[in-house]
Amino acid sequence: MQVIIDNSEEAEARFGFKANNEWAAVTLPREKKSLLEIFSLALKNRDQSFRDITHLAVVVSRGRFTAERVAVVMANALALALKIRLVKVNDFDFTAADQALAAAQFGYLLPEYSTGVHINGAVKHAI
């Protein structure tokens, strides 16, 4: 099963699951849960487990600074532990994900930030 993780929204997390050549989107509220807890719940709701994942994509360059770092770290840890291929995508788009996942490699990802970081109300830009 191929999976997309999108942690860019504040109130919810989105996941895309591709099994039998068909994508299904799942959106779950955060409800003060970690991304890993939400992802585990999404898998459980589909009667799937982490071991069913063959490829993993994570959305970068469009979300909140810390949320993106959390998603990238979780994706890196899962890819390493499960020995699966990993890729980053710029949006929650199944067609683009199909193309990216077809070229996915073993390795790790780094976050990419689309805007500056908001610290104490001010925007700080990376050098």
Image: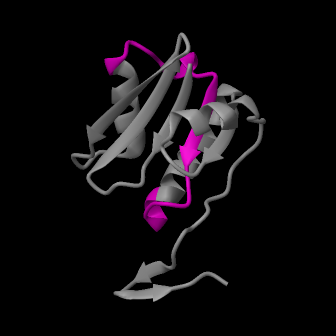
- What is the quadrant of the N terminus in the image? top right
Q: Residue at x 57, y 50 (%)?
A: 72
User: In this image, 61 relative to 79: left or right?
Assistant: left
Question: Looking at the picture, does residue 53 appear above or below residue 106?
Answer: above
Q: Position of residue 87 (x, y in %)?
A: 67, 41
Taking the view exactly as shown, the residue that stands out farthest to the front is 95
Measuring 35% from the left and 54% from the top, which residue is drawn there? 9
Question: In the picture shown, does residue 54 fall above or below 66?
Answer: above
Residue 45 in view here: yes
Q: Position of residue 122 (x, y in %)?
A: 40, 89
Q: Is 113 positioned to the left or the right of 101 in the image? A: left
Residue 116 as seen in the image, left or right of residue 101: left
Q: Is residue 93 above or below residue 111?
A: above
Coordinates of residue 59 in the picture (x, y in percent): 53, 48
- The image shows residue 57, relative to residue 114, as above or below, that is above
**Relative depth, front residue between 100 and 83:** 100
Residue shown at 62%/30% (left/top)?
98
Residue that sits furthest to the left in the current view: 31
**Quadrant in the picture for residue 21:** top right
Q: Is residue 66 magenta?
A: yes
> Horizontal and vertical percent for residue 99?
68, 34
Front one among 98 and 72 = 98
Q: Residue at x 36, y 46 (%)?
A: 34
Q: Is residue 78 visible?
A: no
Look at the image and say whether residue 22 sits in the magenta stretch. no
In the rendered image, the residue lying farthest to the bottom is 122
Q: Residue 53 or 114: which is nearer the viewer?
A: 114
In this picture, which residue range is highlighted in magenta?
Answer: 45-67
Q: Quadrant of the C terminus?
A: bottom right
